[in-house]
Amino acid sequence: MKAVILAGGKGTRGKPYTEYFPKAMTPINEKPLIDYIVRYLNSFNFVKEIIIISDFNGLGGQIKNYYQNSKIGKKISFVQDSQSGTGGDLLHVGKKLDGESGFILWFVDNLCAIDLKKMNEYFIEKKSTACIATRTKRKEETGFAIVEKGIVKQFKEKPTMKLPMSECLGIYILGKDIVRRIKAKSKQNEINLSFDILQELSKEGKISAFDIGDNQWIDAESPMTLERNKKEVKKIITQMGF
């Protein structure tokens, strides 16, 4: 199985930092965010190639330079970001995915020690066209209060809350049919994976949801987010085996 890391995007939420380096190169303990994802993917013996999509003609060139003399770099291939949306980018790796029954898609701003082996088994068991990582509980970043008749009875500092709906994370396992469906919309200037492809599949009952359970997940949108959640980031990295 191959893994695709989407490391393009404008990094709007990470400004002003992302004016100097891409989101993928956000430092965590002196290593870039993307390196934790690459090494974690590499820890699964069924992942035989890692494909990174980014704007290598721009700031994304820093990613390519980072892996230039790395041992793990031999397992990595680089594909130029087409600026045609999250779905459109996958058209440009179509040939690399020929012969694959499915592939992993990982958005670079997702940090999570997800069990990809179990997720893949679940994807196969459900006979789905796509499997998306989800969670049903979340540790909040702010404090909450129990209020009765306008009076605070108790404070809950950054509690773990049960979510009314499953939250979708940016980690997927996608079947080969996904690329075919994207090709069918290739006349569009931009193809959004979620709205243009997965939304249709959900109506057909072809998407399975893999709940990450007690595993933590961070949306690594900016250095500030990572700094604010130092303890959670450290825990996730430890769970990833680093």
Image (spheres, rainbow, N blue to C red):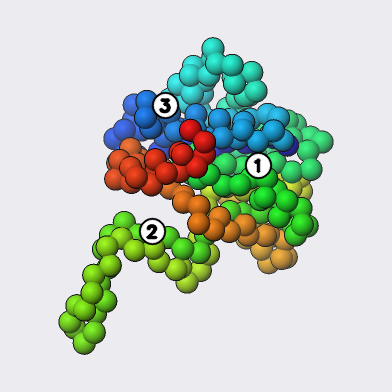
In front of the other: label 1 or label 2? 2
Instruction: Determine whether, in the image, residue 220 is placed left or right of residue 223.
Output: right
Q: Residue furthest bottom?
A: 149
Identify the residue shown where x is 43% and y is 28%: 32
> Which residue in the structure is indicated by mark 1?
104
Marks 3 and 1, the one that precedes in the sequence? 3
**Proximity of marks 2 and 3: CB atoms separated by less than 8 Å:** no
Confirm whether residue 189 shows in the render: no
- The mark closer to the camera, 3 or 1, is 3
Please state which amino acid type lies under the numbered disc 1: Ile
Q: Is residue 133 visible?
A: yes
Q: Quadrant of the N terminus?
A: top right
Q: Which residue is mark 2?
A: 139
Identified at 46% across, 39% down, the residue is: 238
Per the image, the residue denoted by label 3 is 31
Q: Camera-side residue: 201 or 31? A: 31
Q: CA distance from mark 3 to mark 1?
A: 23 Å
Mark 2 or 3 closer to N-term? 3
Task: Locate residue 158, reporting x and y percent.
Answer: 30, 60
Secondary structure state at the residue bearing disc 2: strand
Asked whether disc 3 touches disc 1, contact meaning CB atoms under 8 Å apart, the reply is no
In the displayed structure, does residue 201 sit left or right of residue 140? right
Give whichever of discs 1 and 2 has the lower sequence position.
1
For residue 188, above or below residue 242: below
Please name the amino acid that badge 2 sits on.
Answer: Lys
**Which SS class for mark 1?**
strand
